[in-house]
Image (cartoon, rainbow, N blue to C red):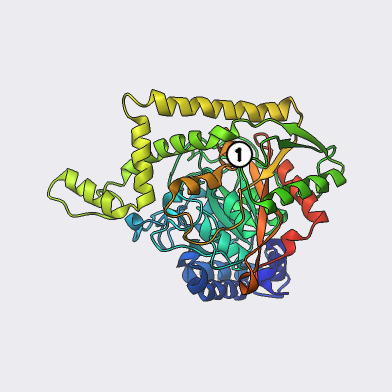
Amino acid sequence: MDPLSASATQIRQMIASGERSAEEIARLSLDRARALQPVLNAFVDILDDEALEQARRIDARVHGGETLARLAGVPVLVKDNICVEAGRTTCGSRFLESYRSPFAASVVERLRSAGAVIIAKTNMDEFGMGSSGEHSAFGPTCNPWDTGRVPGGSSSGTAAGVAAGVAPIGLGTDTGGSIRQPASLCGLVGVRPTYGRVSRWGLVAFASSLDQIGPFARTSEDAALALSVISGHDPRDSTSAQIETPNFMTDLERGVEPLVIGVPRQAHSHSNHSSVALALDTAVEVFEGLGARIVEVDLASTDHAIAAYYLVATAEASSNLARFDGVRFGRRGEGATLDELYERSRGEGFGEEVQRRIMLGTHALSAGYADQYYATALKARRVVKEEYERAFVDRGAHAILMPTAPEPAFELGTKTDDPLSMYLEDVYTVGPALAGLPAVSFQGGFASVGEGDRERALPVGLQVIGPALGEGQLLRVVRMFERVTEHHARRPEI
Ligand code: GLN
């Protein structure tokens, strides 16, 4: 079996049994990353030394007859806003173009101690701001299903790399959809964990009350494995929950019974793409066929979630990004006075979208406007949260099923001049983020787009949203779906 199309568990097994060495697999993955880079532009740095050193350590363990850790020898990709001392940590920004982190994030330490081999840092929308992967200082990332289209964002490079078979697992971050939306556009499983489930220590902050790190994988099984490895309390992150970490693999095959799936009355109203409606309706039938009871839930706040999200996220971003002033981190502009130094550094270092967000956020927080904007957004956030609670508690739903994105992957360049239409791509993903809830995007079907030799099959994602700390349940629901469907097994030809 080709190790690069194998699951993480299979790769570990190949290494443990001596069928392949970890070094051999690391080299295959590094070579594939390098070969695809001109086509996909998914990587910021490819980490040969880091990867080969770790792989050799694993091989030494195999020779020493030691038991291997859970991800021993498994290639993984890491989004470039997560600190790793190897290579740079650029956040997709000119500002941090040559920034090297002196330390590794907690999630990276966890991956390493589980034996994972970090292959590359991945391209992303600058500081996580975007839904297409086109707002990177290092150029757009392309979708492996159709390189004329976007992979989604902001975790664009991880999604493209995992979908293209560079690694079975990758890390992204989801502030308002940046794991789930690219997972949907690239045909992957993407997990946004409950806020507090995964440590954010060593993640460059975008909007601290929303940011979460989570895994991408090709199947629920690999996603469950990766999530088990990176979850857990971390005293260095004060928002990390003091709870035990379940092994999400243990119960994965058990399913959920009886299963109640909530479908929002508004599930269809924000998408005009027939493939999305079809995928949702078909999935509902699949779950009914599996014995699930379907209940209608009301998420009327979906209409306001975008506005609330883009106020809260930009307000927090404007304050988080204040640290980039040209004095301590990254790029420094020329200036005779301190003000000039700030102005030039920020003016030259930040891209257009980041500057737009800083201005929006600063305005939303400014004296005289904060009540009108920021405080109102916080109220709307509360309403969103309460609606979800009602769906779980009063309606008894184990999971809420809805589209992840309003459409499949769109063509590169079609939304870059229209920020509002880009923001609307997040209509289904921002609600769970505002509510701090876990959500898992999975491959729900396919859309056929284009004509003649431009005809392509594109993945269409759906998401299940659960109550706080309900990731295990959600992954089991996705696994139930995978067991009776074939979508997740289909891979792009690249
Ligand atoms: N697309 C959303 C935004 O641009 C979400 C980004 C994210 O989750 N990092 O803000």
Q: Is residue 399 above or below residue 217?
A: above
Report the residue that reaches farthest toward the front: 451
Say which element carries label 1.
loop
Q: Is residue 259 toward the left or the right of residue 84 in the image?
A: right
Query: Is residue 251 visible in the rendered structure shown here?
Result: no
Along the line of sight, the residue nearer the viewer: 335 or 14 = 335
Amino acid type, label 1 = Thr
Q: Is residue 171 above or below residue 22?
A: above
Picture residue at 34% right of the left edge, 58% below the top: 94
The picture quadrant where one finds residue 117 is bottom right
Along the line of sight, the residue nearer the viewer: 411 or 247 = 411
Q: Position of residue 281 (x, y in %)?
A: 76, 46
Q: Position of residue 176 (x, y in %)?
A: 53, 43
Ligand 1 closer than 8 Å to label 1 CB: no
Picture residue at 61% right of the left edge, 76% below the top: 24
Along the line of sight, the residue nearer the viewer: 158 or 176 = 176
Q: Is residue 442 above or below residue 305?
A: below
Q: Position of residue 469 (x, y in %)?
A: 66, 37
Picture residue at 46% right of the left edge, 25% below the top: 376
Q: Position of residue 66 (x, y in %)?
A: 67, 64
Q: Is residue 331 toward the left or the right of residue 232 in the image?
A: left
Q: Is residue 129 toward the left or the right of residue 451 in the image?
A: left
Q: Is residue 396 above or below residue 198?
A: above
The residue wearing badge 1 is: 194
Q: Quadrant of the N terminus?
A: bottom right
